Image (cartoon, helix red, strand yellow):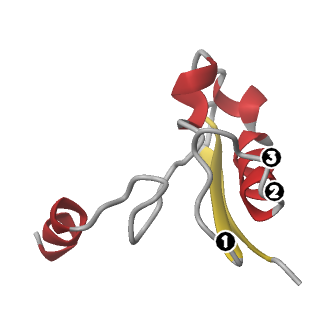
Amino acid sequence: MKGLNILLSTDISPTGKLPINTGGGQISAGQPGLAGGQMNIIEALRQLFGEATGRQVPNPSTAMCTGIGVIPYVRNWGSSAVLILERG
């Protein structure tokens, strides 16, 4: 419950203390699933370059993208990845 309390008590909007999912995620693109794998990276780059009109995080210096992939056949193979981007 500690993690939930942190989310409930923290502003996670684009202008908040902890901006999360500023581009709306895959739901904003019709939930394409694995086909939308680059959407998180594109949003992170837009934020870092100051091109996220209407949802721009003030003065971003770092962005984190996460993703998962699963092949649900036979052995249920899966992978997870995290990418940290930093503005130079």
Kind of element beneath mark 1: loop
Q: Is residue 42 left or right of residue 58?
A: right
Give the residue type at disc 3.
Answer: Ile
Asked if residue 53 lies left or right of residue 12, the reply is right
For marks 1 and 2, the one nearer the N-term is 2
Residue 82 numbered mark, or none: none
Residue 30 point in image, percent of width and height = 59, 15
Residue drawn 64% across the image and 68% down it: 64
Q: Quick one: SS at disc 3?
A: helix
The quadrant holding residue 17 is bottom left
Instruction: Specify the amino acid type for callout 1.
Output: Pro
Q: On the picture, is 59 further left or further right than 10?
A: right
Q: Residue at x 10, y 69 (%)?
A: 1
Q: Quadrant of the C terminus?
A: bottom right
Distance (Cα) linking label 3 and label 1: 15 Å
Q: Residue at x 72, y 57 (%)?
A: 47
Instruction: Report the residue marked by disc 1.
Output: 60
Residue 6 vs 53, above or below: the answer is below
In contact (CB < 8 Å): disc 3 and disc 2: yes
Would you place residue 30 above or below residue 51 in this image? above
Residue 45: mark in rendering: 2
- Crowding at mark 2 (Cα within 10 Å: few <14, some 14-19, many 20+): some
Residue nearest the viewer, comparing 64 with 14: 14
Q: Amino acid at mark 2?
A: Leu
Label annotation for residue 42 = 3
